Amino acid sequence: MTLGDPRGIGPEVAAKALTSMGRSRPLDAVRAIGPVELAGAFEPLCRFEAVGGERVDLTPGEAAGMAIERAVELAMEGQLGAIVTAPTHKPSLAAAGYPAGHTEMLAALAEVDTVGMLMCDEGAGDPRRVLLATTHLPLAEVPVRVTTGLLVSQTRLLGESLVSYWGIASPRIALCALNPHASDEGAFGSEEREVYAPAIRALERDRWRVTGPIPADTVFRRAFAGEFDAVVAPYHDVAMAAFKTVAFGRGVNVTLGLPFVRTSPDHGTAFDIAGLGLADSSSMLAALELAATLASRRVSSRVFAPQMAPGA
């Protein structure tokens, strides 16, 4: 576990989640990584590794960034099968010289070109899974970035994950349309005809069954009722508005395409309640449990399989 920005609720929800998990399973395989001043809170729970040695003058961005670097180093060496990341603060990371986004930083450190942001709620009832084809972009840039190639590569990354790590033999994947009413045959845009149609044709012979484009005002209801195993959404807010409405507090962010498992809770640093003991650790606990589950499924897969060190 990387403990994120030490000023936020990350350390608090991490400690609470570990305490809850420790009631049912040993935590000797868990390592918490963060600034030395957090050692006292985590050493009674699990192994703790301080970044920066005994330095207590690390900026929040340095502490968060160094923890991520160390976790990826250990994972790439085969010493870890999964990384669970507590929330970071993008401006603080950027001020410390790191990429502002967690996912972007992990991809750069792992030297991979294609990653995917999958939001999961694996709780009771039908699982809810939504992949964001584009992530943190200004809305004006979305139509340019949603290309046929992007839809194909993100759908295939999702399909491979559902087969390899969720054990779904023939995943049912829905493509969420970009325009209202999936453009109503061109009345509200041309992307469904010019971008989505060739993507669906390219995916026809794949192992997964792809349906779409389906309008955003119906696709999530259908998927969350069990008709589809996952949805590919074209941009951040159309996905997150639907997902967090039904799954906030239980949702987990899974990064696809890395050579190790990475999960995180579905919330941010919440500076306004940090230090008050009010933070809900449900999403962090779900992230921990899902990371443990995925890491234990030692299926040969380019999506998640750790690069094991020689002789490991």
Image (cartoon, helix red, strand yellow):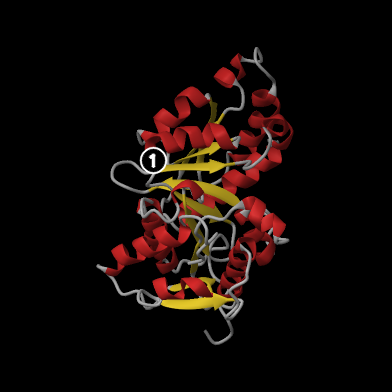
Q: Give the total number of marks visible in the rendering.
A: 1
Question: Which amino acid type is marked by label 1?
Answer: Ala
Q: Is residue 31 above or below residue 283?
A: below
Can residue 276 be seen from the camera position used here? Answer: yes
| Residue at 58%, 21% in the rendered image | 182
| Residue at 28%, 45% in the rendered image | 124
| Residue at 71%, 57% in the rendered image | 95
**From this viewpoint, which residue is outermost toward the top?**
187
| Residue at 44%, 31% in the rendered image | 220
Residue 45 left/right relative to 134: left
Residue 146 left/right relative to 19: right
Q: Position of residue 27 (x, y in %)?
A: 35, 74
Q: Nearer the viewer, residue 24 or 308?
A: 24
Q: Position of residue 309 (x, y in %)?
A: 58, 81
Q: Where on the picture, by quarter, is residue 29? A: bottom left
Q: Position of residue 102 (x, y in %)?
A: 60, 56
**From this viewpoint, which residue is outermost toward the bottom?**
311
Can residue 104 be seen from the camera position used here? Answer: no
Q: Position of residue 193 (x, y in %)?
A: 67, 24
Which residue bears the numbered disc 1? Answer: 247
Q: Nearer the viewer, residue 305 or 37?
A: 37
Helix, strand, or loop for circle 1? helix
Residue 181 left/right relative to 93: left
